[in-house]
Image (spheres, helix red, strand yellow):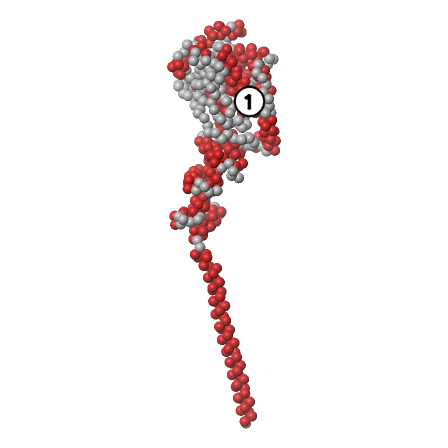
Amino acid sequence: MVGFLMRKRHFWIAALAVSLAGFSCASAYGQKKPKVTKDKSAQKQKKESPAESAEPDKVLYERAMNDIKHKKYVEARLSLQTLINTYPDSEYLAKAKLGSADSYYNEGGVSNLTQAVEEYKNFIVFFPFLDEAAYAQMQVGMAHYRMMGKSDRDNSQTEAAEDEFQAFLLKYPQSPLVPKAAQYLRDVQEVLADGQFRVARFYYTKRDYAASAARLFELTERYPLYSQSDIALAMLGDVYMRAKQVSKNEDDKNHWADLAAKCYDRILQDYPLSSLASQAKEHLKLLGMPIPATDPEAVARMKKQQLYEKHHHETFALKFPLGMIQSRPDVSTAARFGEPNLNPPDDLVSAREILKPGAAGPSFDVVAQAPAAANDGGADSSTATAGPVIEGATSESTTNAPALGAEIIAAPAASPAPSANPSAESPAATISATAPNPAQGGASAQTSSQSEASPAQTAPAAATNGTAQANAQPAATKSDSKSESTSKKKKGLKKLIPF
């Protein structure tokens, strides 16, 4: 019995020991568990505390950039505007303003692009010294570039794009975006020059040479990289040759001959690989002028351009229908090499002044853009006999006669017998599509050009100087009665200046 009790006591003692050991283990486990929990919560606090204290402006900016990436432009602008209004001292303020402008630009449309221009310009005003200012200036030009129309449409956006790209190249010459901006400027100037060329060719085919020469003057002076500058120079040289043919004194003849030779020299110097180079040489030989040397840089530039066009040629069957559908201009013919003109446009040349006696021709200097002297060819414009148009006309009557020298040039076209001299009609039809006809048989070109000045007259009458003056006097008197050019008389327009 005693032994049984002793065994039972040992059992309870053992059980109590086991229970105490388990309790101690459980208590120890329970004490460590809260410590682990506290450590995790502390770590969570350490991780979450920067994000919470951080920078709600950064959160707004990142959210807006994500919205722009997913084309949620309205939501992005709301977040950016909240950032700008709530945190005016934020380090993300400049980025927010630039992001707002980008949202308008990426959304597209005329209204959004117009708003983007304002946003980019505001950014340049407030942050002119940041590196992003160059990007903003580039985007202003790109916004106008996307809104410009074809060459025969309104060119206000095209002119604005030219101004903005020129401003970019002048203000940020060290920017990595300079090559891209230069190419866009060449594209823009191609469109502007093509618009001028279309108008000039229209007036030329209508035999309104004064209006045509005014456009060609500006085109050849300002856009030397235009794809059809050689044709424009040939047309302008032909207009000066026509003015030479109807001039009455040797000073005027020499003056117009010098201006025509300057145009032909320009073809040989700047466009040596042109198909009109051989014709330009023939014209210079007829004028007794020296043949200029070829510019090697111009040859290299034209070779690079021809190689580029060969590798990027588009078939007419594909290009023509696409051009009919698209509203944007075709810039595939724009120059890819050469420095674009960075000078602002000069004053427009009036059709009343372009063929006046002693009028200065183009200087072909796109760097200085300095106007040439009024009496470049040595003609005395102060005398009444210096003009090929009106004899004895006062300064007031000369002002009221818009066509001046060009009126006599165009007057024979209205004669009742234009087919009497078919060789005189061919240059106008040819140059409107390609270039002036070359001289046929040396001296025969001079004979045909002289007969063109008065096609209704016989050869003996045209050869006699006094008779030619007598025949020109009725035409000049007739031109005084009306102040319109030939092409506008047919339409019944009165006192309408073409520019």
Q: Residue at x 53, y 39 (%)?
A: 176
Query: Can residue 319 be seen in the rendering of this structure?
Result: no
Q: Position of residue 438 (x, y in %)?
A: 58, 17
Q: Residue at x 43, y 11 (%)?
A: 383
Specify the quadrant of the image occupied by residue 479: top left
Q: Residue at x 57, y 16 (%)?
A: 289
Q: Position of residue 211 (x, y in %)?
A: 46, 20
Q: Secondary structure at mark 1?
A: helix
**Of residues 175 and 325, which is closer to you in this image?**
175
217 left or right of 272?
left
Q: Is residue 188 above or below residue 437?
A: below
Q: Quadrant of the N terminus?
A: bottom right
Amino acid on which the number 1 mark rests in the picture:
Arg
139 left or right of 439?
left
Q: Is residue 194 above or below residue 444?
A: below
Q: Which residue is mark 1?
A: 266
- Which class describes the residues within 10 Å of circle 1: few (<14), some (14-19), or many (20+)? many
Specify the quadrant of the image occupied by residue 333: top right
